[in-house]
């Protein structure tokens, strides 16, 4: 049995098929972890969603910001943006099955020494606390308050985590940290503007992985394509897996047991 983690698909379906072929992936024996953002911006979002759903127990998925955006559009009254490529999913005959499945996925997956999240792990959160906070959001998404939550999910405030936050503010910071975080300050406050490389953050802010932690999980994440798969200056064990397939880069898998990286080139050029 092999275990692989794969970065943001974002509708790169041809590359996803090519990567699974390269891995000789066997859904009856192997496991595929997907670091979120299965959909959006790329041309094959519906096929990506269908294929990952069809993997059943062979796939473990965390939600990314684009996956949550799809749910917010479909079920929270959010507006579609000009750059979104979600129309085929929204019009698909199997959309309810796919959306129901997506809405049940977690913000964090932990197994052994590995912890997979879409954007990152706030250094203020222990591994155990992070898991509990991810569970809070998953329970809300799976429960009767899901629609109201999706309607209020968007927002950059509050930007800083505090243990005593409650209600929608608490859930919003949890979602933003797990799915949108790049640069933070020493107090665990998020910046939402900088999206480029390591030097693009505002004064006083640094990449979340450049802050030390009191525990030492192997953190697997996607989301930040400008890192090109690297985490220089990292003070935690972090594996960046978004290698920008949708932007003409690569789609990358990490063998969780050997540490080997396997990539296929984007077919979007
Ligand atoms: Mn993302």
Image (spheres, grey):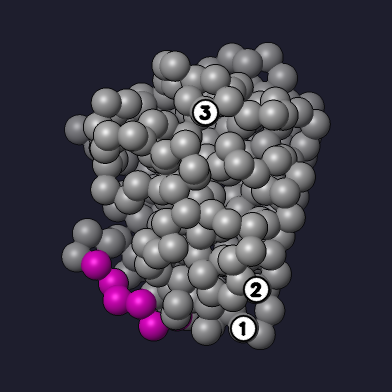
Q: Secondary structure at mark 1?
A: loop
Q: Secondary structure at mark 3?
A: loop
Residue 177, relative to residue 4: is it above or below?
below
- Residue 125: x %, y % from top left: 65, 44
Q: Which residues are magenta?
A: 76-81
Residue 145, relative to residue 39: is it above or below?
below
The reply to whether callout 1 and callout 2 are in contact (CB within 8 Å) is yes
**Residue designated by label 3:** 211
- Residue 98: x %, y % from top left: 56, 68
**Residue designated by label 2:** 140
Crowd class of label 1 (few under 14; some 14 to 19; many from 20; radius 10 Å): few
Residue 2 shows up from this direction = yes
Give the Cα distance between marks 2 and 3.
Answer: 30 Å
79 relative to 155 in the view: left or right: left
- Name the residue located 19 percent from the left edge and 65 percent from the top edge: 82
Look at the magenta stretch and give its main secondary structure: loop
């Amino acid at each position: 049995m092999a275990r692989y983690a794969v970065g943001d698909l974002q509708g790169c379906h041809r590359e996803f098929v090519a990567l699974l072929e390269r891995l000789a992936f066997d859904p009856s024996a192997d496991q595929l972890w997907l670091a979120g953002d299965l959909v959006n911006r790329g041309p094959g979002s519906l096929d990506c969603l269908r294929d990952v759903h069809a993997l059943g127990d062979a796939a473990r998925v965390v939600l990314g910001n684009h996956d949550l955006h799809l749910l917010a559009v479909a079920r929270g009254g959010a507006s579609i943006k000009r750059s979104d490529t979600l129309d085929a999913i929204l019009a698909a005959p199997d959309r309810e099955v796919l959306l129901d499945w997506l809405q049940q996925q977690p913000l964090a997956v932990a197994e052994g020494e590995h912890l997979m999240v879409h954007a990152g792990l706030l250094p203020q959160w222990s591994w155990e606390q992070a898991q509990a906070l991810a569970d809070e959001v998953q329970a809300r998404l799976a429960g009767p308050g899901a629609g109201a939550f999706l309607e209020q999910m968007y927002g950059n405030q509050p930007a800083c985590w505090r243990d005593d936050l409650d209600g929608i503010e608490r859930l919003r910071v949890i979602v933003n940290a797990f799915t949108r975080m790049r640069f933070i300050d020493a107090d665990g406050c998020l910046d939402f503007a900088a999206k480029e490389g390591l030097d693009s953050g505002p004064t006083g802010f640094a990449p979340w992985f450049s802050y030390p932690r009191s525990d030492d999980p192997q953190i697997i994440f996607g989301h930040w394509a400008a890192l090109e798969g690297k985490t220089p200056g990292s003070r935690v064990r972090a594996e960046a897996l978004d290698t920008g397939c949708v932007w003409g880069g690569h789609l990358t898998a990490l063998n969780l047991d050997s540490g080997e990286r396997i990539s296929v080139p984007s077919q979007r050029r």
